[in-house]
């Protein structure tokens, strides 16, 4: 989702372009940059719809990938000592040059980039003639408000304007009134500011900012003035604030593709390592106690798990694991939870699952739980992400940076962590630490069972069969249904084939009428207890011509295609089976000519509600 990068210092335009590229993983559909400086090929610039020049402020924008913006920049060769840039994921207004950020005020003295949503933008726009607006965005109005309310100080003007805004924002602002600084404001959307001896930087996340001297993660209602070699942070009343310097904190290396054609395939291959690293981080009672002390665990009567997308699907499995050991458990979609009636129960532990740690819906749901005095635990893959600062406690998956938008190794690591946490709870409640040690060993063994190279050919074969489908269904019961839900999301998000997961027994209550002899149905049978029942559902499908692709460890040979899963203890089977489905989704996407790493319309980090 939207990324912000701003730089003051030498080669600012190159630095901003580099920063925006590091933020590309978040997902975007247009990009732009604004800078103060006059050095560019004017003839080219004056006749180019991507470039707007206002005295010494220039804005260059393009639709599509960063390479499109780069092409324009390479032709006009701009130079500037101060620049802000943005990658936009469309919310208000379609992806277009006009709607791309930065947005400029009418007098050409202010230019802004924004991440978040300005909920009252229609209301705010009424202060101006409609003719003033050149975009459909909620963001543009901020530039005009800054122009209108300018009071002689850029920072105080920004402060005044932010008080008028309802919604969420990370804003980076340039103004020709004070050409030597970038102004930053934050409420509800993440932003980091930092500096080196000769430079100042603003960026959407800590992993993508390049600074050595200092880096501060802004909190809500804070402002920052970024200058060459200096950053000042202020509270909402513009009183100076001191924040913890995070420049030396652990930052995740993004890694590179190596010999792979896509990050997604690389990341699927990294699953065994991701699970192992995650488990090893908490492989003893002592380590788990630092996250959840024994006296805390003993008091917990209920577990509430909340997340979005794939993280929510990991939570579905978590819920079953906790219930298996006798702890009442619920799992909710974060965006639904926020507006559902909530009846908090005493001694509930609320677990928030988020690979990025930046998902706005999840963080808002977390705040709601805190307001209701629940103990909160964040499960995230990104150290120092926003969620870590809001939750009472944090537990990390150590999957390594995940770049592919479709989550793979992060999901397996989250599920692995749920096995570990639930086992820790059981051991604490039974007062039997040995059980926990055994679980650690088992999980490390399960990680080794996944043998990618052996299974790739069969997964490719399945992709070759299904890629022309209009609609695909996936069925399972219990844990197999949870698995089907994640598998279905994976396939649809990167292949764009309509795909639905159904509880095997529910299909006959309506959806089965959609099945004909062109329909593929994936059937998951990894749990003995429901084997016969799911087989009956398969028969109902076959009787209507549906083609079953079955994933099971049991000996059966009655399907259109069968993928024989390696056998591990039943409860871990989803962790294994999902890898087949991640690979099948990947190969289907590639077969269709899509880019699985950057599926259309999707963002890796969804920072708006
Ligand atoms: C987006 C991504 C999904 C991800 C979800 C939750 O929708 O496209 O892959 O599962 O956000 O993200 P989180 O970072 O909170 O796990």
Image (cartoon, grey):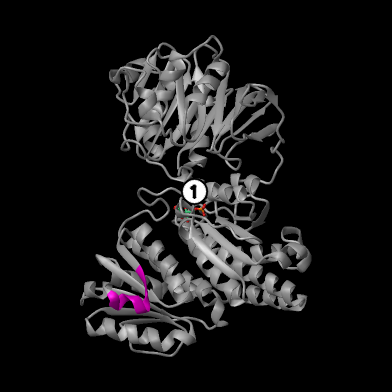
* Front-most of residues 403 and 359: 359
Image position of 427 with respect to 381: above or below: below
Image position of 374 with respect to 534: above or below: above
How far across and how far down the image is residue 55, in percent?
41, 11
Residue 335 showing in the rendered view: yes
Residue 38 showing in the rendered view: no
How far across and how far down the image is residue 521, in percent?
31, 75
Residue 538 located within the stretch drawn in magenta: no
> What quarter of the picture does the N terminus occupy?
top left
**Where does the magenta region start and end?**
501-509
Residue drawn at point x = 65 percent, y = 63 percent: 277
Q: Quadrant of residue 142?
A: top left
* Front-most of residues 188 and 415: 188
Residue drawn at point x = 68 percent, y = 46 percent: 250
Q: In which quarter of the image is residue 410?
A: bottom right
Q: How many callouts does the rendering have?
A: 1
Disc 1 packing (10 Å; few <14; some 14–19; many ≥20): many
For label 1, the residue is: 361
* Front-most of residues 518 and 58: 518
Q: In this view, does 17 lie to the left or right of 29?
A: right
How far across and how far down the image is residue 132, in percent?
32, 18
How far across and how far down the image is residue 604, in percent?
47, 49
Q: Residue furthest right?
A: 286
Residue drawn at point x = 50 percent, y = 45 percent: 360
Residue drawn at point x = 52 percent, y = 77 percent: 573
């Amino acid at each position: 989702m939207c990324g912000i990068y701003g730089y003051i210092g030498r080669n600012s335009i190159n630095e901003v372009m580099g920063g925006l590229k590091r933020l590309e993983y978040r997902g975007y559909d247009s990009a732009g940059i604004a800078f103060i400086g006059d050095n560019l090929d004017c003839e080219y610039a004056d006749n180019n719809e991507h470039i707007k020049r206002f005295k010494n402020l220039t804005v260059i924008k393009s639709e599509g990938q960063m390479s499109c913006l780069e092409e324009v920049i390479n032709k006009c060769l701009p130079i500037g000592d101060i620049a802000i840039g943005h990658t936009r994921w469309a919310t208000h207004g379609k992806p277009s040059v006009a709607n791309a950020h930065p947005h400029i005020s009418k007098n050409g003295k202010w230019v802004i980039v924004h991440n978040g949503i300005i909920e009252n933008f229609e209301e705010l726009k009424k202060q101006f003639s409609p003719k003033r607006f050149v975009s459909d965005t909620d963001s543009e109005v901020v530039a005009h408000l800054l122009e209108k309310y300018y009071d002689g100080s850029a920072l105080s003007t920004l402060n005044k304007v932010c008080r008028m805004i309802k919604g969420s924002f990370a804003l980076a602002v340039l103004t020709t009134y004070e050409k030597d600084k970038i102004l930053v404001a934050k409420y509800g959307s993440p932003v980091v500011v930092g500096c080196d001896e000769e430079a100042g930087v603003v960026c959407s996340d800590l992993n993508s900012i390049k600074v050595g001297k200092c880096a501060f993660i802004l909190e809500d209602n804070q402002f920052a003035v970024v200058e060459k070699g200096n950053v000042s942070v202020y509270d909402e009343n513009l009183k100076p604030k001191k924040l913890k310097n995070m420049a030396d904190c652990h930052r995740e290396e993004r890694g590179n593709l190596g010999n792979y054609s896509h990050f997604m395939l690389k990341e699927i291959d990294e699953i065994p390592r991701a699970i192992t690293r995650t488990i090893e981080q908490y492989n003893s009672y002592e380590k788990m106690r630092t996250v959840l002390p024994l006296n805390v665990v003993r008091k917990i009567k209920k577990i509430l798990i909340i997340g979005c997308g794939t993280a929510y699907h990991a939570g579905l499995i978590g819920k079953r694991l906790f219930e298996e050991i006798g702890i009442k458990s619920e799992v909710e979609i974060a965006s639904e939870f926020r507006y559902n009636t909530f009846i908090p129960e005493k001694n509930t532990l609320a677990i928030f699952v988020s690979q990025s740690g930046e998902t706005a819906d999840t963080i808002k749901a977390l705040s709601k739980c805190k307001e209701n005095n629940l103990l909160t635990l964040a499960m995230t893959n990104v150290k120092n992400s926003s969620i870590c600062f809001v939750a009472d406690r944090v537990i990390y998956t150590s999957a390594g940076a995940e770049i592919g938008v479709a989550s793979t190794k992060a999901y397996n690591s989250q599920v692995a962590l749920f096995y570990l946490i639930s086992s820790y709870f059981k051991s604490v409640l039974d007062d039997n630490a040995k059980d926990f040690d055994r679980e650690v060993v088992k999980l490390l063994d399960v990680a080794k069972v996944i043998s990618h190279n052996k299974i790739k050919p069969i997964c490719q074969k399945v992709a070759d069969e299904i890629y022309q489908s209009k609609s695909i269904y996936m069925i399972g019961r219990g844990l197999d249904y949870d698995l089907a839900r994640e598998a279905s999301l994976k396939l649809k998000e990167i292949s764009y084939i309509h795909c639905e997961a159904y509880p095997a027994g529910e299909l006959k209550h309506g959806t089965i009428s959609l099945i004909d002899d062109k329909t593929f149905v994936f059937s998951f049978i990894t749990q003995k207890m429901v084997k016969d029942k799911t087989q009956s559902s398969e028969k109902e499908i076959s009787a209507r011509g549906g083609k079953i692709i079955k994933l099971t460890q049991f000996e059966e040979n009655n399907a259109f295609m069968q993928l024989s899963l390696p056998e591990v203890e039943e409860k871990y089977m989803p962790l294994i089976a999902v890898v087949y489905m991640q690979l099948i989704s990947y190969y289907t996407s590639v077969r269709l000519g899509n880019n699985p790493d950057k599926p259309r319309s999707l963002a890796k980090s969804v920072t708006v509600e």
